[in-house]
Amino acid sequence: MFHRFLPKEFNFFDLFEKQSGFALDAAVQFKDIISKGDLSEESVKKIKDIEHLGDEAAHDIIKQLNTSFITPFDREDIMALTKEIDDVTDMINTIVGRMTVYKLTKPSKEMAKFADLIEESVRLVVCAVKGLRDLKHSKSITDSCVEVNRLENVGDALRDEVLAELFEREKDPIAVIKWKEIYQDAETVLDICEDVAHVVGSIMIKQA
């Protein structure tokens, strides 16, 4: 219903999907880095490049928002959705950067579990965001958002589990500090995905 009011040369939905696609690219690359323990300059640069592309997509959305009279939904929701999707990519990039600084280069089964959850959650975010283009198929959006919320709960439990194990087995206090921060950051990515789901849910309610 909203499509006919949007400028023919621009569509907010296209950029939302593009932006969330970059978040997924980051999640996939992150999983590859974690599984291989590959914090090479090339791998880290790939994440940074994706993060820059995500920033550009966010800037394009905000630029268009500032010049558009008609928008597909409330301006504050557009801003919120743009910010939260951007935060997903930013946080993944932050984790990789900190692991590089901390020289945490060995493969970690605990981080591999987080990477799996993050990729799965971001894929669901992409599905939910794509669904905004046609709210007649609201069930698929709702199902995706519910699953994102479930994965966030799984992430909470995993964080507590790996921290308990870390405090139990690791004798080096510096290593404890490093890994504690990384695990918490990884869980934060899942928190942000849940925030995206909440924004999407709010948009659905307003447009119902």
Image (spheres, helix red, strand yellow):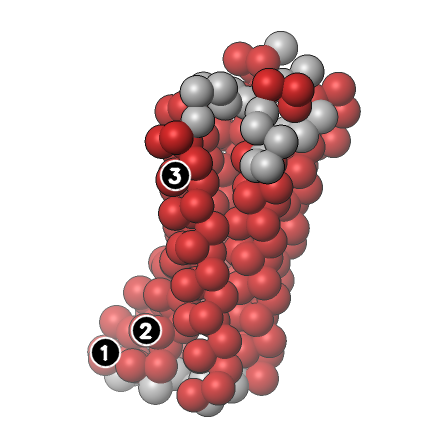
Q: For the residue marked with disc 1, what is the amino acid?
A: Pro
Judged by depth in the image, the label closer to the viewer, 1 or 3, is: 3
Question: Quadrant of the image for the C terminus?
Answer: top right
Query: Taking 57 as reference, is 116 above or below it?
Result: below
Q: Which residue is mark 3?
A: 62
Question: Quadrant of the image for the N terminus?
Answer: top right
Q: Pointer 3: residues within 10 angstroms few (<14), some, or many (20+)?
A: some
Q: Are marks 2 and 1 in contact (CB under 8 Å)?
A: no
Nearer-the-camera pick, 204 or 108: 204
Q: Choose the circle earlier in sequence order: 2 or 1.
A: 2
Secondary structure at badge 3 equals: helix
Q: Identify which residue is drawn at 41% across, 24% down.
A: 75
Secondary structure at badge 2 equals: helix
Question: Where does residue 134 sit, x and y in percent of width and height?
Answer: 71, 26
Q: For the residue marked with disc 2, what is the amino acid?
A: Arg
- Mark 2 and mark 1: span between their CA atoms? 17 Å
Mark yes or no: residue 52 visible: yes
Question: Where does residue 83 sit, x and y in percent of width and height?
Answer: 39, 41
- Mark 1 and mark 3: span between their CA atoms? 44 Å
The mark tally for this picture is: 3
Q: Quadrant of residue 93?
A: bottom left
Q: Identify which residue is drawn at 53% across, 49% down.
A: 19
Query: Taking 107 as reference, is 135 above or below it?
Result: above
Instruction: Give left or right: position of 172 versus 141.
Output: left
Q: Which mark is residue 173?
A: 1
* Furthest-left residue in this view: 173
Instruction: Give left or right: position of 18 versus 65.
Output: right
Q: Which residue is mark 2?
A: 98
Q: Identify which residue is drawn at 55% across, 41% down.
A: 16
Q: Quadrant of residue 204?
A: top right
Q: Identify which residue is drawn at 35% across, 81% down.
A: 100
Q: For the residue marked with disc 3, what is the amino acid?
A: Ile
